[in-house]
Amino acid sequence: MNELLTAMKERRSVRRFTPEMPKKEDLDQIIEAGLFAPSGRNSQSAIILCVTDPGIRKELMEENCKIGGWEGTFDPFYGAPVILIVLANKEVGTSIYDASLVMENLMLAAHSLGLGSIWIHRAKEEFEGEFGKYLLQKLGIEGSWEGVGHCAVGYTDGPLPPAPARKPNRVFWI
């Protein structure tokens, strides 16, 4: 089996990360893979926010907890030191699909480089609220954006979980 198909079968959502920051070169490659995701009419409309600043990460974690209804010390990003936030341009008809493909490319690229990842939701709510609007304004990002997902990235703390069995009767040949 070729390398890409193997990566697709072996990649798993990671829920325990070490605090060690991935190398910038690896993050650059992961982000580049995201930017090469297919998009409707080649619009390339999705954008990626790469959060490595511990202070901003903490604010993001707190906002995500508020939305999810968690209190205390719960970390919805499972300790991952890097959060890649994918946003869809609301002006583009295929934006949610395009941004979802970016998320998939990010996760596959992370796995191929020996890093773990997980797709965390609630980005939509974050960027509809004051926190997300403030963050975009602070970065000088204009336009109408919808949060699609957070790709939490880092070194896994422990082995990858095994693949669950695939459900039957999901393909119909015509």
Image (cartoon, rainbow, N blue to C red):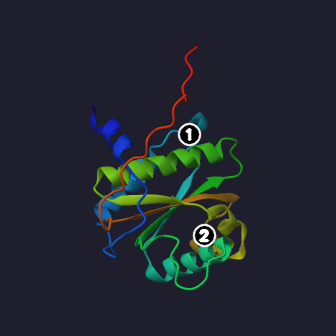
Q: Nearer the viewer, residue 27 or 113?
A: 113
Circle on res. 81: none
Residue type marked 2: Gly
Q: Say above or below: 89 vs 98.
A: below
Q: Describe the element under mark 2 as helix, strand or loop.
A: loop
Q: Say above or below: 164 vs 57.
A: above
Q: Residue furthest top?
A: 174
Chain-order first, disc 2 or disc 1: 1
Q: Residues within 10 Å of mark 2 (few under 14, many from 20)?
A: few
Q: Residue furthest bottom?
A: 72
Residue 145 location (% of width, % of height): 67, 59
Disc 2 vs disc 1: Cβ atoms closer than 8 Å? no
What residue appears at the point 65 percent right and 52 percent down from the top-left corner?
A: 89
Residue type marked 1: Ser
What residue appears at the point 36 percent right and 51 percent down from the top-left corner?
A: 162
Q: Say above or below: 150 vs 37.
A: below
- Viewport quadrant of the N terminus: top left
In the image: residue 1, left or right of residue 73: left
Q: Residues within 10 Å of mark 1 (few under 14, many from 20)?
A: many
Q: Label 2, label 1: how many angstroms apart (C-alpha)?
A: 24 Å
Mark 2 vs mark 1: give the one in front.
1
In the image: residue 136, left or right of residue 166: right
- Viewport quadrant of the C terminus: top right
Residue 99 location (% of width, % of height): 57, 49
In the image: residue 126, left or right of residue 15: right
Image quarter for residue 129? bottom right
Residue 96 location (% of width, % of height): 64, 47
Q: Nearer the viewer, residue 114 or 32?
A: 114
Circle on res. 140: 2
Q: Describe the element under mark 1 as helix, strand or loop.
A: loop
The residue at which mark 1 appears reads as 39
